[in-house]
Amino acid sequence: MFSNKDEFKQIFLKRLEMSSGKSFSECSLQDNYQALGSMVREFVSNDWIMTNERYMKGKQKQVYYLSIEYLLGKLLRQNLINLGIEDIVESGLMDLGICLSDMEEMEADAGLGNGGLGRLAACFLDSLASLHLPGHGYGIRYKHGLFEQKIVDGYQVELPEQWLRNGNVWEVNKSDLAVSISFWGKVETRMENGRLVFHHLNAETVNAVPYDLPVIGYMSKTVNTLRLWNAEPSQFSPHKDILKYKRETESISEILYPDDSHDEGKILRLKQQYFLVSASIQTILKNYRKLYGSLHSLHEHVCIHINDTHPVLAIPEMMRILIDEDGFDWDEAWFITTNTISYTNHTTLSEALEKWPLRIFRPLLPRIYMIVEEINRRFCEELWNRFPGDWERIAKQAIIADEYVKMAHLAIVGSYSVNGVAKLHTEILKSREMNLFYQLFPNKFNNKTNGIAHRRWLLKANPKLSALITDSIGTSWIHSASELSGLLRYQNDSSFLEQMAKIKTENKQILADFIYEKTSIAVDSNSIFDVQVKRLHAYKRQLLNVLHIMYLYNRIKEDSSFECAPRVFIFGAKASPGYYYAKKIIKLINTVADKVNQDLQIADRIKVIFLENYRVSLAEKIFPASDVSEQISTASKEASGTGNMKFMINGALTVGTLDGANIEIRELVGDANIFTFGLSASEVLHYQQHGGYQSIEYYHHDSRIRQAVDQLVNGFFPGVQNEFEPIFDSLLGENDQYYVLKDFASYAGIQEIIGESYKKQQQWQKMSLNNIAHAGYFSSDRTIKEYADEIWGIKPV
Ligand SMILES: *Cc1c(COP(=O)(O)O)cnc(C)c1O
């Protein structure tokens, strides 16, 4: 398409004119973005087609990754980098007086996810394509991604997100490949030619229309596909109230549930899940039939991976097609299904384990319900045979119990692999949460520690550090992140460490300018940038961080000579709109921020910044500018975390509990290069089971705690009455379920050590380098290789 800058400019200008219908000087940045984006998209179309042909011809085993969320962020620059044309394009545009970074601002974040789970799916797609692996994503093309957050008067306000406002240059509509999805209606069972057949009558049908996005591997000819389904009215649905039908249909792909781990129990949500699953499974099986003639050996050539339980209806949906449409008997259909589907568990929080009331499930999906009932019947029979008379066990493990369908149980029973997302998480699954299932199917359980796309979170997000790394150890780390260990050579090289420090300060200055632009608050780039960015959740304990800031404030107010290393505390977090308590914490952070930032006596010793609308593109600005990574969840609650890995690879030092992947970070960098504190997971689990923790004692015995906790309710914050009573109550009235007060002293202690350590800059930079050098392990390339080898059995093409 183009091999040098001048060719690029020529083609770009021509396209710009054609697509915008304007002369160059009249074109807006948005016009420029649209022209460049569609040009890049077309640039890969040949490789895209060829990739699919290779997969078909070679009859390679392929994996389909089903996820209700994809948190993609922006695609333009990453695609340019992966195609190896970033420099040509950037300097060509520069010649034309266009700044690529400005142009990037025209692209909306594709925010089709809540947080870690959705971002993991996006990182996996990048790694699959970059490793030449035949793996595709299936998801929903939500018209509105995760809400846009504004902070007004300290409170979170949610606005509908509008990423499709200017269209999406990356997608290709393939309406000829639409499939039909059935809801409601009745199932009629008849004998025909000596077999039972099932007819789904009076169903309401909806069209699932695919929009395909190319997933471009890094410097590879592999272009995989992310297929997002759009819900549209079907032409043939005989309906009285056409408008109502149209509205109801379109609502299926209207909005992403802004719901991070709590479940709302809405019919629409279940409709979305089945919509994704049915469209995807129908398509996968149809294509397979076309290529192989029948579905008999499907499991030998296809893997279907479900990202958490949201797509678990893939199991009964496959059974439905195999039995009802292809005439398989139950046993063979079950064999094929359970050898095709693999499942990732993302949480052990019991409130986050999905279950659907039968009163919703049964009428909405009558045939699927029958199949789930039969799966359950057979599973309970098996349990009965193995543990005769153990009713209690059967009640605990049944897929249908207490008028609910338990989605995690269905996932475990109907798949051949169940993986957790970090070592500790998998151990807790095996020994506690899913122990009865582990006893039954020990070989299904395995661990795949999460990872991140290091080409986005380091190469793209932190160009200066990336250039330094490449200058010193060459480019091989871009393909194989484990090569970052080559940096260890420089750990005693003071000029190298100084260069690292300089880059960090420059990145901090860029963030400081951004903060000033957004909040009008000036922060000093020589302070410690101490950052907690992630969804707001009680278990993630933003509250512990805030109480510590209040303590530091109190300390400085009491003793103006109190020495503490100057810090900028930076927060970013969205709260689920219905999560009352989380919203209170946001208000508290902002209230503390106002108090601290406006206090002249505090000056530059502490600043508190809440950056609104935390999302992938904001995250990319924050990680490179961070010194301290706050990973302070109540031990045992954070399955893995991936934010922790993004910080690490950008040289931030972790202050964290021994939870999720923090444990593996510590194993890699050693105790000297991480700041850990607090209760261990087994201590937390012990307290939960046997009691013995009284938060009130910590309130009484630690004056730092008492002062800060009292300030929540004693008028210390002007103008907020009763506002923080729910927080006060959670800590004392409800005995502090997340052990915030229990861990306070240990957290304050480690923070003091962090302040001291930061003063020894050379030593700090050495620790930082150690973190970067060991972060290669957390590339999602490593994770995906493990999935490919140990779960999917797929090979590079
Ligand atoms: C990585 C990421 C997350 C997950 O962060 P955790 O700290 O692991 O919870 C959430 N949101 C965005 C935008 C991310 O990039």
Image (spheres, rainbow, N blue to C red):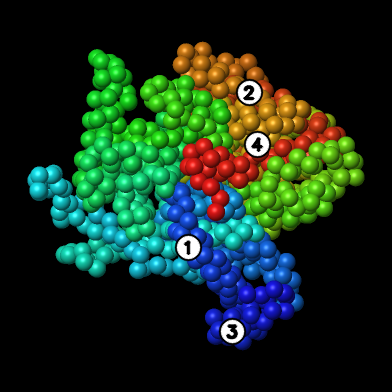
Q: Quadrant of the N terminus?
A: bottom right
Residue ID at (37%, 23%): 440
Mark 3 residue element: helix
Q: Earlier in the sequence, mark 2 or mark 1?
A: 1
Q: Nearer the viewer, mark 3 or mark 4?
A: 3
Residue ID at (50%, 25%): 428
Q: Can residue 495 be seen?
A: yes
Q: Position of residue 648 (x, y in %)?
A: 69, 40
Quadrant of picture, ligand 1: top right
CA distance separating discs 1 and 4 = 46 Å
Total numbered badges shown on the rendered structure: 4
Residue beneath label 1, please? 53
Residue beneath label 4, please? 630
Q: Is residue 231 above or below residue 399?
A: below
Q: Nearer the viewer, mark 1 or mark 3?
A: 1
Q: Earlier in the sequence, mark 4 or mark 2?
A: 4
